[in-house]
Structures are given as C-alpha cells and as structure tokens.
Amino acid sequence: MNKLEKKYKAMVPKEFKLESITHVNFDPHPYTIGIKHINQANEQYCGVLGEDVMIAIPCANPGCNLSYDEHKSDHVMILSLSCDVLESKVAELLKIIVHEINKDKIDGFAFVKNGFNFIKEEERNKNGSTGGHTMVDNKRLP
Ligand SMILES: [Zn+2]
C-alpha cells in the first residue's frame, strides 16, 4: 500500500473499503523504463529512479518517441463495499474527500463487485423503516 492509499484508507467511511489507487486507460501505453533510465539514475540521481529521470529520458517502448508527459492515463480510486450501502452514502463519501482528490489529481472512482450492493432509498423505504437490508453490519467489518 503506497502513501496515497494509506492516506485515503484512513479517510473513507467504514461502509467502503479502499482497494487501490492506480492508473488505467493508458494512452498510448504505459511509459516504459529501459536500461538508459537505470544508468541515468545510477549516474546522476544516486540510484533513485524517480520522475526526474523519466522526464530527462524518453520512453523505452520500441518506436515510441514520446516524452513522459505525453503518456496519458486516468488516475482512479478503486473501492469496494463493506456492506450493503445506501446510494446516498456515495455523496457523503465524495463530500469527505473531494478537496483531497482534486489536490492529489485523482480523476474518478471505480467500484469492484464483491457481493454487497448499493440500495436505492425507495427500496429501503418499501421494506419498512428498518429496511430489508442492513446498512452497516458490524459483524462483517474487520
Ligand atoms: Zn511510450
């Protein structure tokens, strides 16, 4: 788990579980690191292969002449549900983290299907005030 994932793991409400924060939808492909990057890192950056090296050396993918910045992708937070969750909880989640995700340049969310579901407000009301679903089942939480 990286630093960004640790930060958001502590922030997301218990109804949600942070799976990862990752890049998807690469255009044209992920920026590729080659031997030139490793040599540059060793010679000028004390062995640290960071963004500075990637900016200085073009992509190592055969036939690619694009710079590091010309490789695009979406930065996405992958979440799952810890229990059946009312749809309105997503708005609450967004309210809690919107400023931080903008600051951290996270483009959006994706939810992994894991057996728990979003519940529409109408469905909950149909089944009476206590509802047919348990919004937070503490026995299922770690
Ligand atoms: Zn490339």
Image (cartoon, helix red, strand yellow):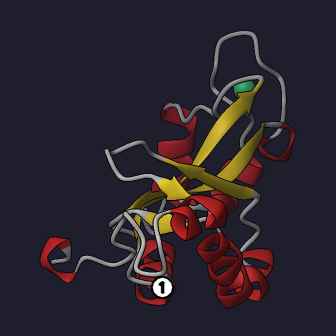
* 49 relative to 125, above or below: above
From the viewer's perspective, is 62 left or right of 10?
A: right
Residue under the point 47% across and 44% down: 38
Q: Looking at the picture, how far across and down is residue 136, in whole percent?
A: 33, 78
Q: Looking at the picture, how far across and down is residue 72, in whole percent?
A: 80, 39
Residue under the point 60% across and 76% down: 89
Q: Nearer the viewer, residue 60 or 114?
A: 114
Residue matched to label 1: 7
Q: Nearer the viewer, residue 54 or 9?
A: 9
* 71 relative to 105, above or below: above
Report the quarter where the C terminus lies.
bottom left
Report the number of numbered marks. Answer: 1
* 35 relative to 14, above or below: above
* Quarter of the rendered image showing ligand 1: top right
Residue under the point 20% across and 76% down: 141
Mark 1 crowdedness (10 Å alpha carbons): few <14, some 14-19, many ≥20: few
Report the quarter where the N terminus lies.
bottom left
SS state under label 1: helix
Q: Nearer the viewer, residue 64 or 25?
A: 25
From the viewer's perspective, is 99 left or right of 51?
A: right
